[in-house]
Image (cartoon, rainbow, N blue to C red):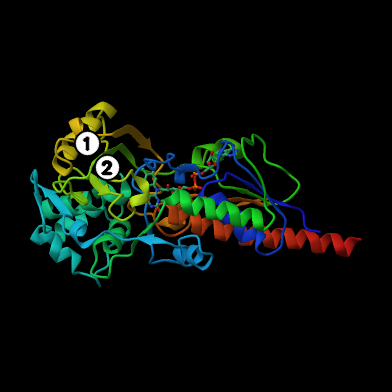
């Protein structure tokens, strides 16, 4: 009999690790501090199903194949044509249907590569001029949640830009019911595979009776492992959720090239997330260095005034929050994902999550690192079982 693998944390990473390990037949137990599973993938209860910020999957990587093969992302929603044509860009304070010409030129440079060592702003300025460089960086803040995306590694930002705005068919996917639906399916599958799940069970000391996968946020992992080297760079943004009675003036998507904000209507592709006749919007605005959270919320409110006219008097649901260091790893010049905290911490302890050394963006890093951590933990468990058999 193998010693059990212990997974600490029941978000996307912890559930992925638990399922991947349990599929091999090794016993797995999972401890989650919160009363419910899902971590940052949790959503509010109906009738308004709102996440901690806009949450989508991209279908162009191994993380998505893994989710799809197991039926976790079945039942997708798509916006109607009428909604899709209201997508637009904010540039120089105005909403416009098409991106500026400089951005269009950049979007077409599919084969171009960018250096790891240089910051994106300097590199993009050299190609398209300073104004376009700033607009490109703000355009991709939709995934970085950072007010100065231009300071990050050019290779990192350019890779994100090509995935989100490049000429390939957009890979964005919305699961009907939101991420909560995916989390619920994953939890069901884990239980089916025999994973012992304990919620309301914070772990303060690492267990020593088998391999351990620490699938918490990086701050918790640092405390648990007592390892101050577990550090990284992530985003900081003001968030706003609003619901209003449906109105033709409201926009489906707005990419904010002036301030790095983003606006999306979630009920356009999934009418299960808002009451009949209402639209649910999720908006974000990165917080600038030295800016107060209130000031960022005010800029976000002004952005919402453009995307959802009169929302302040029309809203039926309204929630504000701020998210700091919760949107996944960002790579600074001279670094790639390989320079983030390694998955293998030695002595049978592994890290999974969106701040560790695995490819992808945001939640994809959690999934990819969890699959790697599970494979290594299973190999450890089998090795220990073989050693016991040989010495018996
Ligand atoms: C505003 C916002 C928008 C986002 N949009 C997207 C998006 O569109 N696409 C995308 O891919 N990603 C997105 N993300 C990122 C995505 O939500 C996260 O990358 C992902 O959910 C992280 O999952 P995780 O399991 O690694 O961490 P978490 O979800 O943080 O899970 C960690 C779990 O560990 C538990 N825990 C912590 N300490 C302990 C302990 N000591 N003992 C037991 N349990 C513990 C916590 O309670 C938590 O449930 C977004 C994030 C935010 C904040």
Query: Could you tell me which residue is drawn at 33 percent across and 57 percent down?
Result: 156
Viewer-nearest residue: 148 or 275: 275
Q: Residues within 10 Å of mark 1 (few under 14, many from 20)?
A: many
Q: Is residue 390 left or right of residue 358?
A: right
60 over 261 or under it: above or below: below
Query: Could you tell me which residue is drawn at 19 percent across and 54 percent down?
Result: 136
Q: Report which quarter residue 378 is drawn in.
A: bottom right
310 over 271 or under it: above or below: above
Identify the residue position indicated by label 1 in the image.
Answer: 300
Q: Which percent across, then down, holds residue 353?
A: 50, 49
Measure how far apart labels 2 and 1 are at the Cα level.
8 Å
Q: Which percent across, then down, holds residue 147?
A: 25, 42
Q: Is residue 342 visible?
A: no
Query: Could you tell me which residue is drawn at 37 percent across and 50 percent down?
Result: 272
Query: Could you tell me which residue is drawn at 68 percent across and 64 percent down?
Result: 24
Which numbered dot is residue 141?
none
* Quadrant the N terminus occupies: bottom right
Q: Which percent across, then down, holds residue 280?
A: 29, 44
Viewer-nearest residue: 14 or 289: 14
- Furthest residue toward right: 392
Which numbered dot is residue 283?
2
Q: Is residue 326 visible?
A: yes
Label 2 SS: strand
Q: Is residue 333 left or right of residue 110?
A: right
Is there CB contact under 8 Å for labels 2 and 1? yes
Cβ at disc 1 under 8 Å from ligand 1: no
Lower sequence index among marks 2 and 1: 2
Q: Residues within 10 Å of mark 2 (few under 14, many from 20)?
A: many
* Quadrant the C terminus occupies: bottom right
Number of numbered labels in the structure image: 2
Label 1 SS: helix
């Amino acid at each position: 009999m193998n010693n059990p693998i212990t997974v600490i944390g029941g978000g996307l990473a912890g559930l992925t690790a638990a399922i991947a390990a349990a599929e091999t037949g090794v016993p797995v137990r999972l401890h989650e501090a919160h009363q419910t599973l899902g971590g940052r993938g949790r959503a509010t209860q109906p009738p308004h199903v709102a996440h901690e910020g806009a949450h989508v999957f991209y279908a162009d990587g191994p993380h998505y194949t893994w989710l799809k093969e197991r039926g976790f992302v079945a039942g997708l929603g798509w916006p109607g044509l009428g909604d899709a044509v209201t997508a637009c860009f904010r540039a120089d304070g105005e909403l416009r249907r098409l991106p500026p010409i400089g951005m269009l030129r950049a979007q077409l440079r599919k084969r171009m590569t960018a250096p790891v060592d240089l910051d994106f702003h300097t590199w993009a300025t050299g190609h398209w001029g300073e104004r376009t460089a700033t607009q490109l960086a703000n355009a991709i803040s939709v995934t970085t949640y950072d007010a100065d995306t231009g300071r990050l590694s050019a290779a990192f930002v350019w890779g994100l830009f090509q995935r989100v705005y490049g000429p390939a068919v957009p890979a964005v996917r919305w699961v009907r019911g939101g991420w909560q639906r995916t989390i619920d399916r994953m939890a069901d599958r884990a239980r089916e595979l025999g994973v012992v799940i304990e919620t309301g069970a914070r772990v303060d000391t690492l267990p020593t009776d088998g391999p351990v996968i620490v699938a918490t946020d990086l701050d918790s992992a640092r405390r648990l492992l007592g390892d101050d080297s577990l550090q990284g760079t992530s985003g900081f943004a003001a968030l706003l959720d609003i619901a209003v009675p449906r109105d033709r003036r409201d926009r489906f998507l707005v990419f904010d090239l002036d301030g790095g904000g983003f606006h999306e209507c979630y009920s356009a592709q999934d009418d299960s997330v808002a009451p009949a006749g209402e639209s649910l919007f999720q908006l974000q605005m990165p917080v600038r260095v030295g800016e107060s959270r209130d000031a960022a919320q005010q800029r976000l409110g002004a952005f919402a005034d453009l995307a959802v006219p009169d929302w302040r008097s029309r809203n039926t649901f309204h929630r504000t929050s701020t998210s700091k260091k919760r949107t996944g790893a960002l790579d600074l010049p001279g670094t790639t994902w390989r320079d983030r905290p390694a998955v293998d911490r030695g002595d049978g302890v592994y890290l999974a999550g969106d701040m560790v050394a695995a490819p992808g963006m945001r939640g994809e890093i959690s999934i990819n690192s969890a699959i790697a951590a599970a494979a290594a933990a299973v190999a450890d468990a089998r090795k220990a079982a073989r050693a016991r058999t040989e010495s018996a």
